[in-house]
Image: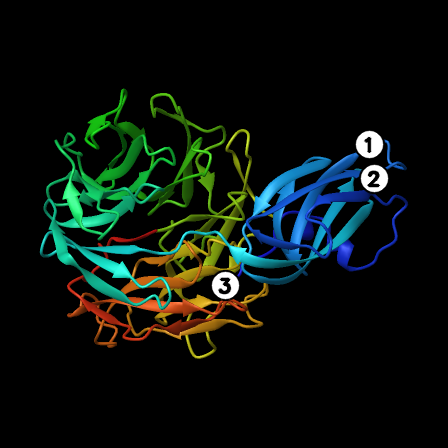
């Protein structure tokens, strides 16, 4: 599903699209890209705006890569940013709003000739029953996966969630049985995993998620003890890959954590929680990895229904980190927050929450997992019922609501590959909707680059020892 154009488009009542006359009209000067140019992705946008008739100046500027598809907003009279765009022709618009109610825009038509996003290379999936991580090579042209020559690496007891660093050099696994973290070097030539030396200290409780800092210097693990005591463990990564507890770790979490994410700047960490309708937020001390609660946290999830289990199982950033998207566990409700880039504070975005409408023949759906297209075009949501992974077009959610019916009722993880060409998820091969049914499977889909719809890859579902019992780990690296 494509992310709705929150913030300015809704905030100003679609003023720019309705041709409403204002007393003032900002002047928008775009210096890059040049109208009619051919560019490679990411495309460098630089622009400035002024409003001679408005003494209060410019309020904000925004880049649209298609009508209604705003991908970047800045509360300033200048912008300078790189936007990832798929190859094709675009009628982009840079628009500005002044503080007197005026709106001005400049259109720039460009052709994107190539995309420099990294191609997918390896896929890893944990097997909680056999205490292994299975290793796969990804064909970057077709998306089809094949086992590596090593096939798998041994882990601690009951491996579950996993995470890799941004460069795809190391993989970390949260072991829920032995309650510790395994670390591996990724062989960049063949995808095989080799254990890093040493081991971190134990994690108290049940580890629920793991995330690596963008710098690769720290690994964060959330855990819970029967939902009553909740922690965030911080491990520093040594030069040889070993993990050692960072000063002050573990940090106390207020509510039962499910998934953690870190913004691209490495300054903020956010946690989805279950059994309570909140998102927790922390500032990261980049010098030692320590955490400090953000002002105003925990942030309330909007739209919670009284007949639903409160909270969420997953969350993800969208639009270059300007929004945090949280699919709530019940009734298809999706919360969208604006992220303050300076303070990390979350505020409910105009138009949030939104609802993923189920097909007419089904009851409201539960949303288990989310992955955002690397080019910020669509969201992919895994619904436990009616067992589908939707990818769609435009912000209405209904105009081209495409859904791939998987038959995998209990899948709880979905991940887009780094190039935006493929989407992978966990399920089983039976298609009978039975939780934990065997044999397990990895589901693979090709993404229609024009509208985000999904088509099963040749051979999908790929048989795998992976189970869909709710403790899956799935990582796609370049």
**In terms of sequence position, does the residue under pointer 1 or pointer 3 come before the other?**
3
Marks 2 and 1: CB-CB under 8 Å?
yes
Q: Quickly name the residue at label 2.
A: 100
How far apart, in angstroms, are the residues tagged by discs 1 and 3? 38 Å
How far apart, in angstroms, are the residues tagged by discs 2 and 3? 34 Å
Report the residue at 39% width, 23% height from top: 285
Left or right of 274: which side holds 345? Answer: right
**In terms of sequence position, does the residue under pointer 2 or pointer 3 come before the other?**
3
Left or right of 115: which side holds 443? Answer: left
Location of residue 426 in the rendering, given as x and y in whole percent from the top left corner: 27, 63
Query: Crowding near pointer 2: few (<14 within 10 Å), some, many (20+)?
Result: some
Q: Secondary structure at mark 2?
A: loop
Location of residue 362 in the rendering, given as x and y in whole percent from the top left corner: 41, 75
Picture disc at residue 56: 1
Report the residue at 38% width, 66% height from top: 141
Work out whether residue 468 can be spotted.
no
Report the residue at 37% width, 33% height from top: 215
Work out whether residue 406 can be spotted.
yes
**In terms of sequence position, does the residue under pointer 2 or pointer 1 come before the other?**
1
Residue closer to the observer: 390 or 163 = 163
Marks 2 and 3: CB-CB under 8 Å?
no
Q: Quickly name the residue at label 3.
A: 1
Q: Secondary structure at mark 1?
A: loop
Location of residue 453 in the rendering, given as x and y in whole percent from the top left corner: 47, 70
**Which scheme is used to colour this image of the protein?**
rainbow
């Amino acid at each position: 599903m494509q992310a709705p154009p929150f913030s300015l488009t809704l905030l100003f009542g679609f003023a720019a699209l309705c041709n409403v006359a204002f007393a003032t009209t900002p002047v928008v000067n775009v210096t890059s890209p040049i109208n009619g140019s051919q560019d490679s992705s990411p495309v460098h946008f630089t622009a400035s705006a002024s409003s001679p008739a408005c003494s209060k100046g410019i309020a904000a500027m925004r880049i649209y890569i298609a009508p209604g598809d705003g991908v970047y907003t800045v509360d300033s009279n200048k912008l300078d940013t790189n936007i990832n765009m798929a190859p094709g022709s675009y009628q982009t618009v840079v628009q500005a709003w002044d503080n007197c109610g005026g709106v001005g825009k400049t259109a720039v038509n460009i052709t994107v000739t190539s995309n420099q996003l990294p191609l997918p290379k390896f896929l890893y999936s944990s097997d909680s029953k056999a205490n292994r991580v299975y290793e796969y090579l990804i064909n970057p042209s077709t998306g089809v996966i094949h086992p590596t020559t090593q096939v798998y690496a041994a882990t601690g007891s009951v491996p579950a969630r996993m995470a890799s660093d941004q460069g795809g050099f190391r993989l970390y696994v949260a072991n829920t049985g032995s309650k510790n973290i395994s670390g591996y070097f990724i062989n960049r030539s063949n995808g095989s995993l080799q254990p890093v030396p040493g081991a971190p200290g134990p994690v108290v409780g049940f580890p629920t998620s793991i995330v690596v800092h963008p710098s690769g210097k720290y690994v964060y693990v959330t855990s819970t003890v029967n939902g009553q005591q909740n922690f965030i463990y911080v491990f520093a990564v040594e030069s040889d890959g070993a993990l050692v507890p960072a000063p002050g770790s573990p940090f106390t979490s207020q509510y039962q954590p499910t998934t953690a994410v870190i913004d691209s700047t490495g300054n903020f960490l956010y946690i989805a929680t279950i059994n309570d309708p909140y998102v927790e937020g922390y500032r990261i001390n980049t010098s030692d990895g320590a955490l400090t609660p953000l002002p105003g946290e925990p942030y309330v999830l909007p739209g919670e229904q009284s007949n639903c289990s409160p909270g969420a199982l997953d969350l993800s950033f969208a639009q270059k980190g300007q929004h945090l998207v949280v699919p709530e566990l019940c009734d298809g409700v999706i919360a969208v927050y604006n992220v303050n880039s300076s303070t990390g504070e979350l505020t409910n975005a105009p138009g949030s929450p939104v609802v993923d409408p189920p097909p007419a023949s089904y009851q409201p759906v539960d949303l288990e997992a989310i992955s955002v297209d690397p080019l910020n075009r669509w969201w992919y949501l895994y619904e436990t019922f009616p067992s589908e992974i939707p990818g769609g077009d435009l912000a209405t959610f209904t105009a081209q609501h495409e859904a791939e019916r998987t038959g995998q009722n209990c899948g709880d993880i979905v991940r887009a590959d780094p190039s935006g060409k493929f989407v992978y998820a966990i399920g089983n091969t039976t298609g009978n909707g039975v939780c934990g049914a065997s044999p397990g499977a990895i589901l693979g889909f090709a993404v229609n680059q024009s509208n985000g719809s999904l088509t099963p890859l040749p051979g999908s579902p790929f048989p795998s020892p992976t189970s869909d019992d709710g403790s899956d780990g799935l990582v796609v690296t370049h």
